[in-house]
Image (spheres, helix red, strand yellow):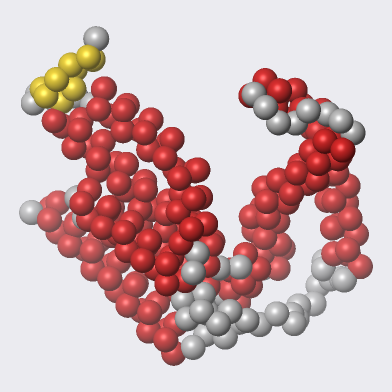
Amino acid sequence: MATNAIRALHPMTKFTFALFVTAAVIAVPSYLFAYAMFAALLVIAAAAGVLREFFAFVLKTLVVLLIIVFLMQLLFYPGDDIIGGWWVFTLTQEGLAYGLLLTSRILAIGSAFILFFRITEVKDFVKALENMGLPPAGAYVVLSTLQIIPEMRRQSNVIMDAQKTRGVETEGSVLVRAKAFLPTLTPLILSAIASTEERAITLESRAFSAPVNKTSLHTLERRPIDTGLIALFTIGAVALIVWRVAVWIL
C-alpha cells in the first residue's frame, strides 16, 4: 500500500482533481492561469515523489505537439494587429495570444492526466469505476485498453533484446533502427494474439462470464478526506463553469 499521502488518496479523488484542472483552464481564459496550474502540478508531482518521471514524460509526449500547435496558430490565426511577417506568413498579436492560450491549456490538461496515471495504479482506477457501477466486462475492457500499450512496449523490448543477442544491429541512425524494428512486427503481433487467447482462457477458467455477482480480493477504501476533496473539486469546477457562462452571457 502506498505510504505517500497523495498516492494514498482514492483513485476517484485524483481523477476528480484532473477533471477540475480541465474545467478550470477551460473556464479561465488566461494562459498565465493555465501555466500556473502546470506549475502547481509540478509541485504536486514533487510531493508525490514522481517529479522526474512526470516531467520527463511530459517532455516526451507534449513538447513536440505544443510547438506544432503554437506555430500553426501563430502563422495562420487571423488578426488585425500585425507584429511581424516571415515569407508568405503574417504574424499577428491575436495569433500569438491564441497560440499561448491553446498550448497552455493542452499542457495543463495533458499534464493533469499524465500525473493522474503516474500516481494511480491502473487496477485501482478500474476497481474504483467498478465500485461506481461499471460492469465487470466494461472494467476489463478499460483495464486491457490502458495496459495494451505498456504491455506491447515491454514485449517489443524483449524481442529487440533477443534480436540484439543474435547480432542484429538495433542502435544507430533512424534508418538502422527502422530496419531492426520491422522484423519485430510479426513476432510482436503473434505474441499479442497469443496473449489475448491466454487471457480469454484464464478469464473463462475463473467464471468471468458466469451470470452471478462477482467478488474481488482487491478492495479500495474511501476515507473522509477523499469525500471532502471530491466535493471541493466538484464544487470548484461547477462554480468556474457557472462563472464562465455568466460572463459569456453578460
Q: Position of residue 163 (x, y in %)?
A: 84, 35
Find residue 240 and report its image quarter. Answer: bottom left
Q: Position of residue 90 (x, y in %)?
A: 19, 17
Q: Position of residue 198 (x, y in %)?
A: 89, 55
**In this rendering, would 48 be left or right of 83?**
right
**Picture residue at 82% right of the left edge, 36% below the top:** 164
**In this rendering, would 55 be left or right of 133?**
left
- Determine whether 206 is above or below 223 in the image: above
Q: Residue furthest top?
A: 88
**Picture residue at 18% right of the left edge, 22% below the top:** 91
**In this rendering, would 181 be left or right of 241?**
right
**Picture residue at 50% right of the left edge, 43% below the top:** 60
Asked whether residue 222 appears in the rendered view, the answer is yes
- Location of the N terminus by quadrant is bottom right
- Determine whether 93 is above or below 152 in the image: above
Find residue 73 and report its image quarter. Answer: top left
Of 203 and 74, nearer the camera is: 74
Q: Position of residue 151 (x, y in %)?
A: 73, 51
**In this rendering, would 55 be left or right of 117?**
left
Q: Residue furthest bottom?
A: 224
